[in-house]
Amino acid sequence: MTLQEIIDESSRIVFFGGAGVSTESGIPDFRSADGLYNQKYKYPPEQIVSHSFFTEHTEEFYRFYRDRMIFPDAKPNAAHLKLAELERAGKLSCVITQNIDGLHQAAGSVNVVELHGSVHRNRCMSCGKKFPLSAVTESDGIPRCECGGIIKPEVVLYEESLDDSDIERAVHEISAADTLIIGGTSLAVYPAAGLVRFFGGKHLVVINKSAISADRSADLVINEPLGEVLGKLIVR
């Protein structure tokens, strides 16, 4: 079957995506040849985006975070827009994303599970006051609340746990789906990647530039840019 045929006969699609969804919006991924993990910094990026590094080297964390993890000018691409269109048409029930950029919501998607949080949600570690992204981007050094507390992004760092309610929502949506589309992810980051094992529906589709482990059990594998593939779909 073609992707168009699968979409046409599906009524409860779930999309599970990773960094490759946003690369066509100009946001670099982590693991490709020119991704963050292959660039040179004073500390390895994996170490910088860990809870212990945030605690021990907070100012250095924010230097990297502002420079390499926030892209306020990025716009939704064809993949984001098509997924939102599928949701409006009643075909897609949920987007589950490992990304923290908020582009799915910017494109119009409503039911979005952000497994790793969002750069757009920030909170004072002392008093709990919430702050927008501008509190981080428009400050120097360590962003602080009026109470003096450190403002921390509500993103899941290494050594931190995923939110239980997000996991429950993701498992529920994947379990209830008739079609699961895995797109733009290497499925290398756990526990998020392990959620796809809860799918027991009819069609498993993988759209990724390179081969991944889920290819072996997929009904359809497409090794092309996600935006190009989804952008061609006709929503009926």
Image: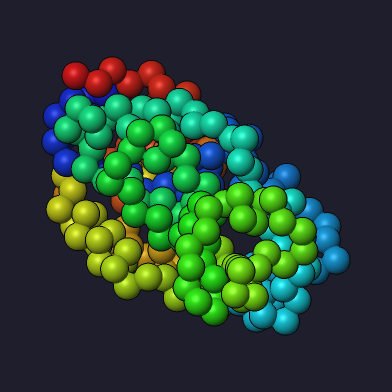
Q: Is residue 28 left or right of residue 3?
A: right
Residue 194 found in image quarter: bottom left
Name the residue at 69% across, 51% down.
138
Q: Quadrant of the N terminus?
A: top left
Figure check: 178 above or below 170: above
Percent across and percent down for residue 165 are 29, 68
| Observer-nearest of 218 and 87 | 87
Name the residue at 28% across, 18% down.
234
* Image coloring type: rainbow
Residue 154 visible in the picture: no
Residue 220 found in image quarter: top left
Percent across and percent down for residue 51 are 61, 77
Residue 228 visible in the picture: yes
Q: Quadrant of the C terminus?
A: top left
Q: Is residue 204 left or right of residue 153?
A: left
Name the residue at 32% across, 64% down.
166
Percent across and percent down for residue 18 are 48, 49
